[in-house]
């Protein structure tokens, strides 16, 4: 038998946007060896670009199956920073949501989701051989299977969860 290597990032597609962008670029240029992808480095306009999936994904040769929410809770908190974004007091997991009736918050969240979805589609999912399970739930990581993760994170698309979708993609189905 031969070995097949694939990459499966779980909530690892971060947009270069907001305050997080500057922090990540600084860390990437100061602390990380960003020479890991020469093609990305050659095409980069700014130092640290290759720390962000939207810039490096087109240059990755390994097939990628992304598990990602377009309304990633961590990214909404740290990158989008919508107005009227508040912690859900009934959530034991620190989830946030728009304050009731805040159209500004909903507009910011929806805009961020659309930008993340467009970037994912263009840079990663549009590349032959790549795949993904992209949901629209407010969570960050941990959506693999209800039996293995917190029960509140169990997204489905047409009745299929992330683990089933990965199995179908990996098996060529």
Image (cartoon, grey):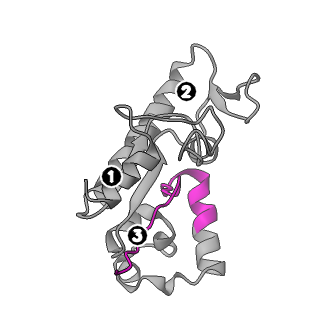
Mark 2 vs mark 1: which is more N-terminal? 2
The residue at which mark 3 appears reads as: 6
The residue lying at 69 percent from left, 28 percent from top is 86
The foreground one among 43 and 132 is 132
Q: Quadrant of residue 84?
A: top right
As drawn, 143 above or below 172: above
The foreground one among 29 and 9 is 9
Q: Which mark is residue 79?
A: none
Other residues around mark 2 within 10 Å, as few (<14) / some (14–19) / many (≥20): many
How far apart are labels 3 and 1 at the CA level?
A: 14 Å
Q: Does the magenta segment cover residue 134?
A: no
How far apart are labels 2 and 3 at the CA level?
A: 37 Å
Q: Secondary structure at mark 3?
A: loop
Q: Does the magenta segment cover residue 12?
A: yes
Coordinates of residue 42 in the picture (x, y in percent): 36, 83
Other residues around mark 1 within 10 Å, as few (<14) / some (14–19) / many (≥20): few
Coordinates of residue 32 in the picture (x, y in percent): 61, 80
On screen, residue 47 versus residue 159, left or right, reads right
As drawn, 80 above or below 55: above
On screen, residue 111 versus residue 125, left or right, reads right
Magenta stretch?
A: 1-24
2 and 3 marks in contact (CB < 8 Å): no
Of marks 2 and 1, the one in the foreground? 1
Mark 3 vs mark 1: which is more N-terminal? 3
The residue lying at 26 percent from left, 64 percent from top is 129
Mark 2 vs mark 3: which is more N-terminal? 3
Q: Which mark is residue 168?
A: 1
The residue at which mark 2 appears reads as: 105
Q: Magenta region's main secondary structure?
A: loop
How far apart are labels 2 and 1 at the CA level?
A: 36 Å
Coordinates of residue 54 in the picture (x, y in percent): 40, 61
């Amino acid at each position: 038998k031969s070995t097949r290597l694939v990459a499966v990032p779980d909530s690892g597609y971060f947009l270069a946007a907001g305050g997080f962008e500057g922090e990540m670029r600084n860390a990437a240029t100061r602390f990380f060896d960003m020479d890991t992808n020469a093609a990305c480095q050659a095409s980069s306009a700014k130092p640290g670009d290759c720390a962000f999936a939207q810039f490096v994904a087109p240059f990755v040769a390994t097939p990628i199956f992304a598990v990602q929410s377009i309304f990633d809770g961590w990214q909404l908190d740290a990158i989008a920073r919508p107005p009227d974004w508040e912690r859900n007091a009934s959530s034991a997991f620190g989830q946030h949501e728009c304050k009731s009736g805040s159209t500004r918050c909903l507009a910011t969240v929806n805009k961020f989701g659309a930008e993340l979805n467009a970037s994912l589609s263009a840079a990663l999912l549009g590349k032959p051989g790549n795949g993904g399970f992209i949901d629209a739930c407010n969570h960050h990581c941990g959506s693999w299977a209800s039996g293995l993760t917190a029960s509140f994170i169990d997204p489905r698309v047409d009745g299929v969860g992330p683990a089933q979708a990965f199995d179908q993609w990996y098996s060529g189905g």
